[in-house]
Amino acid sequence: MDDLLLNQFLLLGAVLFCLGVYGVLVRRNAVLVLMSIELILNAVNINLIAFGAWRGDVAGSVFALFVIAIAAAEVGVGLAIVLLIYRNRRSVDLDDIAELKG
Amino acid sequence: MLSLLAQGTEFVRPDVDFHAFAPELVLTGAIVLVLLVDLFTPASSRGVVPQVAGVGLLAAMVPVLTLALDGTDRSLFGGAYAVDNFALVLKALFLVAGYVVVLLSTNYIAEGDYDEGEYYFLLLSSILGMTVMASSRDLISIFVALELLSIPAYMLAGWRKRDLHGNEAGAKYYLMGVFASAVMLYGMSLLYGFAGSTLLSDIGATIGEGDTRPLVTLGIILVIVGFAFKVSAVPFHTWAPDTYEGAPTPITAFLAVSSKAAGFVALLQLILVAFPGRTDVVGPLMWVLAALTMTVGNLIALRQTNIVRLLAYSGVAQAGFILAPLAVVGTNPDGALQAIITYLLIYAAMNLGAFAVVLAVARKTRSAEISTWGGLFEYAPGLTVLMSLFLFSLAGIPPLGGWLAKFVVFRSLLEPDLTAGGVTLAVVVGVNSVIALYYYANVARQMWMMPNPDGDRTPVRIPVSLGAALTLSIGVTVAFGVTNLATRFGDLAHLLPA
């Protein structure tokens, strides 16, 4: 892989990362926040695989596999928590979740 | 697939040193045992589950001790997993603190409307992640250990699933934690790309030596910010008070002590092994984080009326004290390492003790409001004395452990020679210690001098497990204060040279 191609992948990763961070900070729906976090993780995977291919090193792809597997477990737990909130208050709006203050 | 495998070179079985792995293996065995015991015992005799979990944690201490007596540093998987004195001291801390959390949980979980088997299963899984974290010297193993300790903790924080506060605690902890680990991973991907290796020692050799390319600096900052969430450093602390209040109180103690210590362990490994040449970035960043964390934490703690929230903000402030030595890591790396390990050991003992008293008092008052603690001395003099000792230790009054912890932080900031950053931060630490004394003393005043709000003077009945936790934590808090045990552990804990 030449340097120009690497740059394009890194740029794609950076754009996805920024979109994800923007989504986490701005979106108020818990499910959309989870999707934004997935965008960040995909930016990470693109970076890792692009760097790995550029260096001809397998560690990047292995790291990306770990990220994919653990992200799946994370989202499983996250959706379970969101589901609990929905059962108890019929809404997944993060602005509503503000019982505790101080 | 098979033809592809046949083309490959002949598989060589890696030489695995099972003794080095033994603490984790024993803990894994205990995790399986807890699940099986929960499955095959009738609901009436579930009381055996916490005992199995406690024995499992103590059994995992045995290989830690044999490894410590053996004394050789071991390095596995090409340096990705190291068993040195640093790792062993911290594994012992995580296992003993975990045992105390099991003692705190025993009655709380049994008497509440909670699932018992899964609770201890998740608690042990999280502790397993922490023991792995203590040995991780590679980006991938740090990431896996971080998630292994965090994911069960998200579920434990939201354990009271029919309670809106419990839901909120879980949701806030989860969202902030996952966002932080995603940001940290992006930083790790940049570091991997520029260093070409995930090993911390290789990263230290290639980019640590004054590589000032902006993307490398960005990677370092993102990774540190990711762990700043874990240790609840300001401005990334917003989850901590809400999660601490809404989570079951034993889990609050667990998050405030073990989970925070695990974050510091990862920070130490990254800063001392992977970024030793970039203290120009790390030092100022840590100076700002430490000063902000202790000041903001203390100022907000001043106006808390709930004891758990007070301890949450005091924990934020204490995290600032623990971060402070990292600001001078460029001039005094050994002193910073020793100060942080010493502080973590003492902080674990005194904070777990304070939470044990909160749990004991809440058995009678059914509340965590400080106003309900009035007149505690009349009906629970023992608990009052213990709580006062823990609070004064947190405030740093000699001869209790907290005093020594503050002392080593000051010493690391002012040695080997005075620097502008070290001296100014030492002044900030000093001012904050005085502010902290005010709100700790305020709780003590409530217990000793204020009248009993409801006139109910029935003594507090302390169950055996809670009594054991109180005895253990007060013993360690006093022992660390009057002897030099904690600093000796701190001296022992040298990282394997990169």
Image (tube, coloured by chain):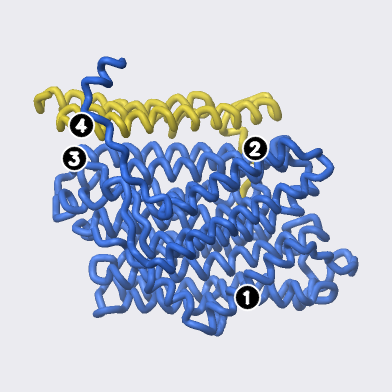
Chain colours: A yellow, B blue
Tell me the SS state at disc 1.
helix
Type of amino acid under label 3: Gly
Q: Check disc 4 and report its element: helix, strand or loop.
A: helix
Distance between the alpha carbons at the discs numbered 4 and 2: 40 Å
Answer whether residue B88 is visible to the viewer in this image.
yes
Number of the front mark, 4 or 2: 4
At x 77%, y 44%, the residue is B46
Q: What is the distance, in whole Å, between disc 3 and disc 1 at their CAs?
A: 48 Å
Residue marked by disc 1: B475
Do pointers 4 and 2 mark residues of a single chain? no
The type of residue carrying mark 2 is Asn
Assign a secondary structure to mark 3.
loop
Identify the residue at horizontal 39%, vertical 36% (top origin). Answer: B182
What residue is rendered at 68% in x and 24% in y? A90
Please name the amino acid that badge 4 sits on.
Answer: Phe
**Element under label 2?**
helix
Task: Determine which residue is flagged by label 3.
Answer: B196
Q: Position of residue B496 (x, y in %)?
A: 30, 61
Q: Give the image location of residue B219, x and y in percent.
A: 26, 44
- Give the left or right position of residue B127, taking residue B67 as reference: right
Q: Position of residue B220 (x, y in %)?
A: 27, 48
Residue B468, by quadrant, is: bottom right
